[in-house]
Each structure stands twice: as C-alpha cells, then as structure tokens.
Amino acid sequence: MHFLHFVLYNTISLITVLNPLAAAAVMLSLVEPEEVKSISKAASFTVFIASITTMLLGGIILKLFGIDLPSMEAIGGVVLLIVSINMIQGKEIIPTKHTAEEDSAAAHKDNVAIIPLAIPIIFGPGAITTIIVLNTNAGLSTGKIALFISIIISYIIIFLTLRYARYISNLLGIHGLKIATRIIGIIIGAIAMKFLVEGVKGIWM
C-alpha cells in the first residue's frame, strides 16, 4: 500500500471510530462555555497518549496472551460492528448505567476531560481494537510511521472539533449531528466488515 494511501486509510479509520462529533455533543452538555478550550486540550491530549500507548504496547499484549492477528481482526470486526449498528440506530455507542446525580457530579469534576470524555466516550474498546489491528498490519517501520502520523492528524482533528464544538453544533444543528453520526456509523460498519472478513479468512486458512 502506498505510504500516503496508508496514512489516509489509517486516519479515516481512526477518526470514524473515535467519532469526535459525538464527543463534542457530549462535551457541550457537561461543561460551561468558558471551559471548552481547556477541556478540549486535556481530552484530545489524553486520547493522543492513549493511542500512542496502545500502538506501542498492543503487539506485546497480543504476544503475551498468545493472540494471533486473525483472531484480533475477527473480534475487532465484531466490536466495531456493534458500535456501527448502535450509531446507525441512534443509540448510545457504549451503553452505561448512571444516575442524574452522577451526571451532575461529573459536570463539576476537574477530570471530566479525561473521564468520561476522553475515556471511554472518545477512546473506547473500538479505538483500542482498531489501533492494535492497524499497528499489527503495518508491518515494516514505514507502516508504523504512517500510523503514527495518522494518530497525530487524528489528535489535531479531535482537538479542533472539540474546541469549536459550539460553532459546529450551531452550524449542523441537532438533526445535522444525528445525520453525521449515522453516516460515520456506516463507514465504521464497512471497516468492521473488512476486519471481520480478513480475520475469519485468516483463521480458516
């Protein structure tokens, strides 16, 4: 795969899974307007660190537990497919049980940028699986450099999306955000099917 093509493919895969638009909508419901800038910086940087850590340690974890790439691709495809279906249907991407009191408390915590915004709303199981699979498929050093560049690009896009979340929300409106989320869900579904088919084919062979 051509280097620039690899960077583009990785970036699209990461951005669709990380889904900064959905995170932006959540952030606006949790923080005050004057906190958006600082929260955006902290959340996007947390996602960047989590992404790099997963990229560096993902392969080691697979070897430690004796997990081969086809198995990881197959389960990754299933995880992403669930995320995709939830997004297309307009459901909560990662259903969690919480009370109104907990939501209110979270809105006033200094670490809201890290939990729950960065983890797990932006950087969840789907992102972890995607990075591990992309990194394992990267092969040579040039592929890993391409993935690293894609992570940096994703970090910048996440920061800009969160930083200007209010403007984006006003521009797209509620219905626009819902439509965008569903379109992203379809893209994630296509990536999920690719992972799943490749994984099953690898296991079968």
Image: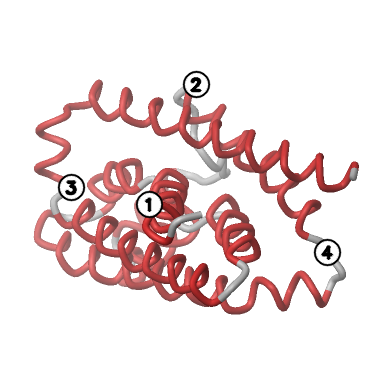
The tag earlier along the polypeptide, 3 or 4, is 4
Question: Of helix, strand and loop, which one carries label 1?
Answer: helix
The residue that label 3 is drawn on is 165
Q: Distance between the residues labelled 3 and 1?
A: 24 Å
Left or right relative to 13: residue 76: right
- Secondary structure of the residue carrying tag 3 is helix
Q: Mark 3 to mark 2: distance in Å?
A: 23 Å
Mark 1–mark 2 Cα distance, whole angstroms, equals 27 Å
Whether residue 62 sits left or right of residue 15 in the image: it is right
Q: Is residue 196 visible?
A: yes
Q: For this rendering, which residue is in front, 104 or 161?
A: 161
Q: What is the number of the mark on residue 67?
A: 4
Rendered position, 166 above or below 39: above
Q: Which residue position holds label 1?
A: 8
Residue 135 location, x and y as percent? 58, 65
Image depth: mark 3 or mark 1 in front: 1
Residue type at mark 2: give it: Gln
Disc with the residue nearer the chain's start (4 vs 2): 4
